[in-house]
Image: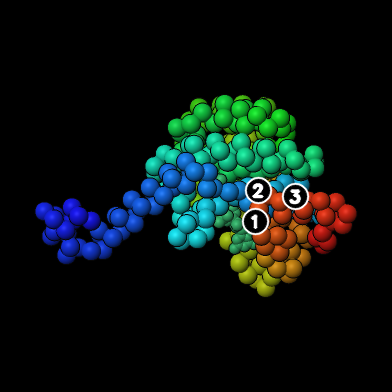
Amino acid sequence: RAKAEGRGGWRFFEPDMDVEAQARRKLEFDLREAFARSQFELYYQPIIDVKSGRASVCEALLRWRHAERGMISPAEFIPVAEEMGLIVEIGQWVLREACRTCATWPSDVRVSVNLSPIQFRRGNVESTVRAALADAGLSPERLELEITETVLLQDTPTIRLSLERLQSLGVRIALDDFGTGYSSLSYLQSFHLDKVKIDRSFLVGIEVEPRAMTLLRGVARLSADLGMDVIVEGVETQQQLVVISAERSVCGVQGFLFSRPVPAPEIAAFLGSERQESIRVA
Ligand code: C2E
Ligand code: MG
Ligand code: MG
Ligand code: MG
């Protein structure tokens, strides 16, 4: 401020740029502070197995309650953390925390963790994963990693090798947000991934527009034929669930219809109550 009003006082006539740059610097500062002070939290959202009607996996989703601004969406702060490189350390924390929490759940429930492409580029993902599993005493079969096309886009021998090594440990790899990026279909063939999560944009109009369901069905069957488990994200209504679960190639559903992402104690309670009475899927 002082600087801007002193010798660089002319900046005063470009207030927008100044305000934007300052807000950005403040966000970066606050992110570092929040991380140093352990102010991040993980929420969990169940993914329901269509056959059993039970939660087979819970996805860990990062939450940041800012002192002045309240909850800030990961869609806003994760790109900033990625540009700062801070996502590597945050990502390590997420893995450890998610594995520790999963270790307290019923043993047939897995945890799913989102990985940033930056973690593959700058961090040693494989050793981070190994350390997190060992630290929590969690079996690798109970961990799933969600990656996006951007990771596969970097297609290098190193990426292939780290994915294969993780898989040979028993960790499952899921392709997240499928269908939102570019030429995704070829990735399905050339990488041997375990799961595909079909983006919720495929659900628009699905209850009323047969062509929308045709598209979803096509992608789901293609993925299933290539040996992957198919998950549909963003299920919000019973009508959507009815049409989706009629498609045999879909094996899991996730969305607000079943549960919003909730704090660890709440997901533990959900997983507990769910033991008695499974959710009616179809
Ligand atoms: P994502 O991995 O695709 O996660 C699913 C997002 O969809 C979550 O948003 C979730 O709250 C939201 N969602 C779930 N069901 C529904 C529904 O029925 N309707 C609608 N409208 N939305 C639904 P969230 O938690 O805001 O996270 C946004 C994105 O931020 C995530 O998308 C993921 O890409 C990223 N993210 C979150 N946590 C982490 C993390 O720990 N590490 C990294 N690298 N990225 C993360
Ligand atoms: Mg995800
Ligand atoms: Mg997703
Ligand atoms: Mg998404």
Reading the image, the residue beneath label 2 is: 59
Disc 1 target residue: 261
Q: Earlier in the sequence, mark 2 or mark 1?
A: 2
User: Mark 1 near ligand 1 (CB under 8 Å)?
Assistant: yes
Give the quarter of the image for residue 132. top right
For this rendering, which residue is in front, 152 or 124? 124
Badge 2 crowding class, 10 Å Cα cut-off, few under 14, some 14 to 19, many 20 or more, is many
| Separation of marks 1 and 3 at Cα, in angstroms | 12 Å
Which label's residue is closer to the chain start, 3 or 2? 2
Q: Amino acid at mark 1?
A: Pro
Three-letter residue code for mark 3 = Ala
Q: Nearer the viewer, residue 185 or 129?
A: 129
Badge 1: residue crowd in 10 Å (few <14, some 14–19, many ≥20): many
Check the picture and name the quadrant holding the C terminus. bottom right
Q: Quadrant of the N terminus?
A: bottom left
- The residue beneath circle 3 is 268
* Tags 1 and 3 touching, CB below 8 Å: no
Residues under labels 3 and 2: Cα distance? 13 Å
Q: CA distance from mark 2 to mark 1?
A: 8 Å
Q: How would you rate the neighbour count of disc 3 (Cα within 10 Å): few for under 14, some for 14-19, many for 20 or more?
A: some
Q: Quadrant of residue 129?
A: top right
Question: Residue at coordinates 61% horizontally, 27% vertically from top-left?
Answer: 131
Q: Quadrant of residue 111?
A: top right
Residue 211 placement (x, y as % from top left): 64, 66
Question: In this image, 196 relative to 29: left or right?
Answer: right
* Mark 2 CB lies closer than 8 A to ligand 2: yes
Residue at 56 percent across and 38 percent down: it is: 93
Residue 275 x, y percent position in the rendering = 85, 51
Q: Horizontal placement of 265 versus 152: left or right?
A: right
